[in-house]
Image (cartoon, helix red, strand yellow):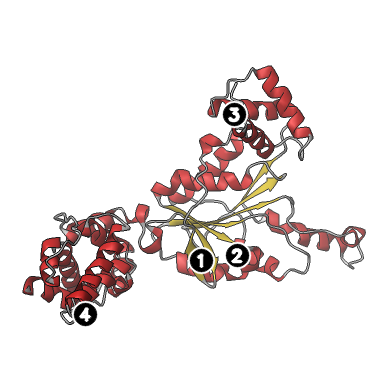
Amino acid sequence: MARVYEPGLRLRSLVIFRNLLEDPVIAALQDLFDEHGDIPTRVRRYAKFAAALYEHGDNLSDYILSAVLCDENPVMAALALNRPISPCFEEAFRQELKLLEQISQITSEDMKDLVGYKGFLPSYEITGYDFRKCYGDRLVEISRYGYGIFVRHRMFLFENHQLIPVLNPDPITLSCLPGYEQQRRQVLDNTAALLEGRPAANVLLYGDSGTGKSSTVKAVVNELFDRGLRLIELKKSQIVEIPALLDRLSVNPLHFILFIDDLSFSRDDDSYATLKAVLEGSVSSKTGNVAIYATSNRRHLVKESFADRDGDDLHYNDTIAELTSLSDRFGLTITFEKPDKEKYIGIVGQLADLHEISMPREELFARAEAFALHRSGRSPRVAKQFIESLLANGEMN
């Protein structure tokens, strides 16, 4: 019994890994280690713990090790940046890691003995791990995996000054996006430069709606996630928070795309000046691990009025230059134009091959053209909708 209670009591003393006490499985473990309570109370505690664990599998060691490796704490943050840690931190870290390893090795039989119930209680598995070695191995790969919420998630929203993981991100891949290969190669090459520590441009993806601008960015993130790339999507109203977010991300070992979809401004928009100052030319030099990617249907991003063009401003040329200068501050502008008939049919054909649709090509293309006429015209989005309509109706040949 002492074998179980002793590390259980010490669990309450965690400092470096204190965030783990809020983890549902470890919190249930902590309650289970409480020696007070009658047998029915201890049975309920055990059942609560087992239910929480079973949501993630049946191996306690796997779960605790994963929680440890994903935890965001001062030691992990310092080691990830190759910064020294104090002897006090080092001792606390070493002792707590040893404690968590010990707890991960407590068998279900020992736990059942603690409960003291003779009826059936579910079991779980354990695996022998050297937590210190596993932690060292993770640090070697820290630029790929990161720590904290970045380990398990690739795309995030920014709400109330907090990063919120997207639990079900768009799984789109580059292979599912036919057409515009040259444009996508430009985005992919620029993002690879960011990951490799070379100068990477902030990117404006400009063009007609439905041409795959946003899908391209998300597909690139999915492609390069395993190399340490993450995406944070911002609303236009959150642009004023970019400077603070850049400071926060600059000390993270991962690389980030700050993504602003469907960007445009009115002339008197306050966030216009903020973004203009942040971009500061073509290269993201202030924070070497972050680049800003934006999509827009407007080449110059700012909605111009006839008054702007007629020059009711005293300095007409300066007014127009000011309105159009923001897009020029993106180091790379990539244009996605609506496809002509030949390109549209080519996209339809590639999508049909991808989904193994064997309909005669002459019939397929004629129906695709008719479909586009009843929609918003030819575009990759319309081509995808056409193929999806065939699949929904079971028209494979």
Report the quarter where the N terminus lies.
bottom left
Earlier in the chain: of badge 2 and badge 4, it is 4
Q: Which of marks 4 and 1 is in front?
A: 4
Q: Which of marks 1 and 2 is in front?
A: 1
According to the picture, the residue beneath numbered tag 4 turns out to be 13
Asked if marks 2 and 3 touch (Cβ < 8 Å), the reply is: no
Earlier in the chain: of badge 3 and badge 1, it is 1
Label number found at residue 394: 3
Q: Residue, x 50% and y 45% (percent of image)? A: 171
Asked if marks 4 and 1 touch (Cβ < 8 Å), the reply is: no
Distance in Å between CA atoms under marks 3 and 1: 49 Å
Asked if marks 3 and 1 touch (Cβ < 8 Å), the reply is: no
* Left or right position of 197 against 57: right
Distance in Å between CA atoms under marks 2 and 4: 43 Å
Earlier in the chain: of badge 3 and badge 4, it is 4
Asked if marks 3 and 4 touch (Cβ < 8 Å), the reply is: no
Give the amino acid type for the residue marked by disc 1 in the picture: Leu
Q: Residue, x 61% and y 68% (percent of image)? A: 238
The picture places residue 18, in percent across and down from the top left corner, at: 28, 75
Residue 92 visible, this angle: no
The picture places residue 331, in percent across and down from the top left corner, at: 61, 51
Distance in Å between CA atoms under marks 1 and 2: 10 Å
According to the picture, the residue beneath numbered tag 2 turns out to be 278
Q: Nearer the viewer, mark 3 or mark 1?
A: 3
Give the amino acid type for the residue marked by disc 4 in the picture: Ser
The picture places residue 219, in percent across and down from the top left corner, at: 52, 44
